[in-house]
Image: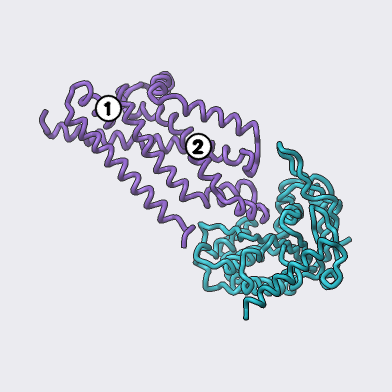
Chain colours: A cyan, B purple
Amino acid sequence: MAFIEIEHLEKTFQSKSGDTEALRDVSFSIEQGEIFGVIGLSGAGKSTLVRCINLLEKPSGGRVIIDGRELMKLSDSKLRLARREIGMIFQHFNLLMQRTVLDNVCFPMEIAGIRKREAREKALNYLEQVGLSDKASAYPAQLSGGQKQRVAIARVLASKPRILLCDEATSALDPQTTQSILRLLRQINEKYRITMVVITHEMRVVEQICDRVAVLEYGRIVETGRTREVFDEPKTEAARRLIYTREYTDIESEGSGI
Amino acid sequence: MTWDAETVRMLLEGIRDTLYMVLFSTLFGYLVGMPVGVLLAVSDRDGIRPRRWLYRVLDIIVNLLRSVPFLILLILVIPLTKLLVGKSYGSSATIVPLTIAAAPFIARLVESSLKEVDHGVIEAAQSMGASPRTIIFKVLIGEARTSLLVGVTISLGTILGYSAMAGVVGGGGLGDIAIRYGYYRYETQIMIVTVVILVVLVQALQAIGMMLAKLLDRRRA
């Protein structure tokens, strides 16, 4: 059995104007240490999918099995413990704005009941790893987008996760910053063997760090494979559309560089 | 009328009584209103523990209490005041209706402050395995602290206004003096002085509250 198993996942949002099927019969598996990408246009259901992996969103059907444990069968308190092993970073970083950088990194350790002095020492170490030792006493509002995402990564490392979910983690960043964040994620993946699920609408993100990729369209997975294969020979119209978009923007950015 | 030592002493006592009523009513108001406000924010549809029935019940109670005019409330709760304080007039007695009027108002202020907290930050805490208790104390209250402090300032000002109304039933404090001298005895001068003191008090509370709120706000670079 693979490290992460997603089986026949369904998610329907109910509202007065009718039901919306955000995910339909989504299945895939991810091996330990792998970086797995999920790509799709906005509205395809990517964010819903990633939120179903740590049950921030309760699936309407199907199963989420992590390291042999079925998450939906866990009690609330067991689920909270399980979530400590599943870190998450976000498009808008979601840092605590009223706390210093250091205290943000300490937060997951506070939740885990680690003593304050010990937590601070460790937090400084994690900040060093993301290259932000000098910002420990700054507040998030004083940082750039890339620096905020580094704080979020240090914070996620502090809970020693085995899995890291990245929800459009580079979508609010400029191309250079995106590169540096992707390099950092790669390093972390290699150093700690953290399995990663990368949700994005940017082809280049997938191209650079994902081992395998799934293409999501209208809540369904239409294609899964090794990144190179999907890029070289896309089998579906949806995948082709995404790749052509990439080539178009590549030409455009080269053009503007002249 | 003459400005003798007696008048000055009376006005000083009025300030003392007013501050005593306002501070204690706000304190008791928060002891009741803060938990209710937290429950409202947490149990609402988008809260971290949606509980439809709990929200509805609290919502109705808060609305009911808030729609009773303070003057009517003042008279309605006299039996309760006698039971708790032993008498129905004077500053200590006035704290009872003031607290009852303040608590639902404070609950709403707290509710709206907590609902301002960015949902993404709450989600991040949930993804770390934070318990509802941790989210309430460290994320909701921690992140909303500036807004909560502004709420305290608004509450103090509002309660100060209510406390002046309590003068009608012999509530003590500056409002009492203003009504007794200005209204019943036509001593306009004393009335004006008390009103000026009330204005200064509101201004001072407002200024101090806003300064503290700004001092504690780290959301801007």
Say which quadrant the C terminus of chain A sits in: bottom right
Q: Quadrant of residue A234?
A: bottom right
The label on residue B57 is none
For marks 2 and 1, the one nearer the N-term is 2
Residue at the spot of label 1: B176
Q: Which amino acid does the dot numbered 2 rest on?
A: Arg
Which residue is at the front of the view, B77 or B200? B200
The label on residue B108 is 2
Residue count near mark 1 (Cα–Cα under 10 Å), binned few <14, some 14–19, many ≥20: many
Parent chain of label 2 = B
Q: Is residue A14 left or right of residue B72?
A: right
Q: Quadrant of residue A151?
A: bottom right
Q: Residue furthest bottom?
A: A258
Q: Position of residue A7 (x, y in %)?
A: 86, 53
Q: Is residue A10 left or right of residue A128?
A: right
Q: Is residue A108 left or right of residue A143?
A: right
Total marks shown come to 2
Residue at 54 percent across and 68 percent down: it is A144
Q: In this rendering, is residue B57 above or below B119?
A: above
Spatial CA span between label 2 and label 1: 29 Å
